[in-house]
Image (cartoon, rainbow, N blue to C red):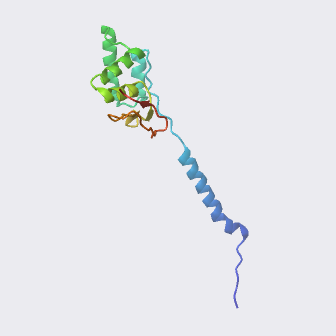
Amino acid sequence: MSVQQRTPQGQRSRPFAYFGLVCAFAVGAASAQIAAPATGIDSSGSYERERAACLNGATPQAQDTCLREAANAQADKRKGELQTQGQDQLVANAMRRCDALGGEDHAACTARVLGYGNQSGSVGGGGVIREVETVVVPPGQTEVTIEPKTDNPVLIVPR
């Protein structure tokens, strides 16, 4: 004689409900994005604001380093040595770095500095990678077939 035990309908579906909840929490946790902290330092050059940002932990630096840099910036400002560079000056400085290179390397460096090609990464993440495709026509050839390998190709053909 066999005895069959019947389980109520709710007891069989309970493990599935728990599994569903676990999956929902996992998806929610995986899709959560953490906002990058603001540095708390603006371009006004206000020592008080910069010091407050250092003391509140609103900067990614260690507190003693942050306070030292704020004090040094204030001292430079008093001496008239603290200058904020305009975008033109920043681009000119970057272009000057390319002057040490020649030929194809100079052309590729200039393209990267001017923002052509692909860019990925971040300074906070460890580095920015800039990629530009360069096509070099072999000596003696007048035609070349170009097959771009990047998503947003900018092709530089140096002469």
Q: Nearer the viewer, residue 11 or 24?
A: 24
> Residue 61 or 95: which is nearer the viewer?
95
Residue 128 point in image, percent of width and height: 39, 34
Instruction: Tell me, yes or no, if residue 64 can be seen here.
Output: no
Q: Quadrant of the N terminus?
A: bottom right
Q: Residue at x 49, y 35 (%)?
A: 152
Q: Is residue 49 above or below residue 64?
A: above
Judged left or right of residue 106, residue 3 is right
Can you give x and y, in whole percent of width and height, for residue 148 in the image?
46, 38
For residue 76, which quarter of the picture?
top left
Say if 113 sits above or below 76 in the image. Answer: below
Which quadrant of the figure has residue 131? top left
Residue displayed at 34% across by 19% down: 93
Residue 156's image quarter? top left
**Looking at this rendering, what residue extends furthest in the left direction?**
100
For residue 140, side relative to residue 20 (left or right): left
Image: 17 above or below 57: below
Q: Quadrant of the C terminus?
A: top left
The x and y percentages for residue 47 are 39, 16
Say which residue appears at 31% left-offset and 24% top-offset.
Answer: 98
Q: Position of residue 55 (x, y in %)?
A: 40, 26
Q: Tag count in the figure?
A: 0
**Is residue 144 visible to us here?**
yes
